[in-house]
Amino acid sequence: MHTKVIGPVVPLPVPFKENQDVDYVALDSYVCFLRDKGIKTVMTTVGTSRFNLLSMEEIKKVNETVVKAAGEDVVTIVANPSHGSLSDALSYAKHAEEIGADLFLAYFPDRHYGDDAVYDFFSTISNAIEIGILIHEMPLRNGLGGGQVHYSIDLLSRLFAQKNIIGVKEESLDPAHSEKIVKKFSDSAVIIGAGGGMSRYLRDYWLGAKTYLAGIANFYPELELEFYDAMQSENYKKAYKIVHDIEKPFFEATVPLGWHICLKEALNICGLLPSHERLPLKPVEQEQANKLEAVMKSFGWVK
């Protein structure tokens, strides 16, 4: 997996029908689209995949749908939600292994009362399955008061010493801490830089990063792959131009409207997924959808 998880990793929004049921047929078709366009790694994330809105049975069926549709040529990373007990997390992890997922993305669902509890949580999962494990590394709410707590370098070192904990989805939201993690572990662990897309990879590439969480690749994989190929061939001028002439203005137009719902609407505009959401999450307003479509037309992504 250290050599296979490279380039853009595409997070998968879960599609819903108009009646708010999960649309597994649309999800299958969408994963096949990404596979056929050359995407090599897909992920059901805690956030983009709307796992906070799904039942345990739905989450497992989403994960299974993704793995089956991806086939053998695409690395599949499936997750547990941000809530639930250790027993629940073990159920998701064991199911991920049963369905043939390549990696399990594990989220610690509690407050931080000390590193030992966090270590024990991931260690227990590590001892229960044989497939690789990624840590969803986000700031933890401090159970003792005083704000949030990062996964320290020492804690990550302890966790990476486990037999199959092989990396993180790095989402510390702190550029200085992110830099420390990429510098320290990029040669020995999978570090998926979350947030920022290609611009994040432009930053982390020089620190040794080999992969990142994509954004535009969700609906226009060709551009993201063109950028990644430019970076690998050291055509940095081309890669920089893609980021600053296309990705940056697109994010500036969409992120203030709400990235996750704008991403779903972008997929709807491209005819890839319906824009329906499950309450309390609502799709973008029509006026916002019109603005988004205008931006996408200006880049030539839709007619």
Image: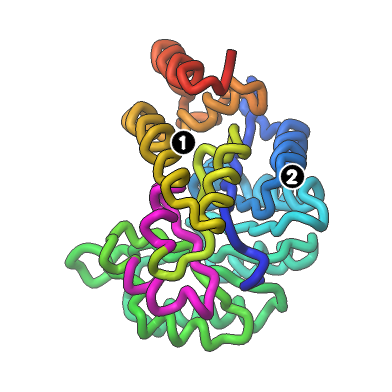
Crowding at label 2, few (<14), some or many (≥20) Cα neighbours within 10 Å? some
Q: Secondary structure at mark 1?
A: helix
Residue tagged 1: 260
Coordinates of residue 102 in the picture (x, y in percent) = 71, 65
Numbered range of the magenta stretch: 179-205
Residue 197 visible in rendering: no
- Residue drawn at point x = 21 percent, y = 63 percent: 147
Q: Position of residue 293 (x, y in %)?
A: 48, 16
Q: Quadrant of the N terminus?
A: bottom right
Provide the secondary structure element on which disc 2 rests: helix
Q: Residue 32 occupies which quadrant of the picture? A: top right
Q: Position of residue 55 (x, y in %)?
A: 62, 46
Q: Please name the residue shown 50% across and 61% down the image.
A: 192
- Residue topped by disc 2: 35
Above or below, 228 relative to 175 = above
The quarter of the picture where residue 117 lies is bottom left
- As measured in the structure, the alpha-carbon distance from the residue carrying label 1 to the one carrying label 2 is 21 Å
Where, quadrant-wise, is the C terminus in this rendering?
Answer: top right
Can the viewer see residue 34?
yes
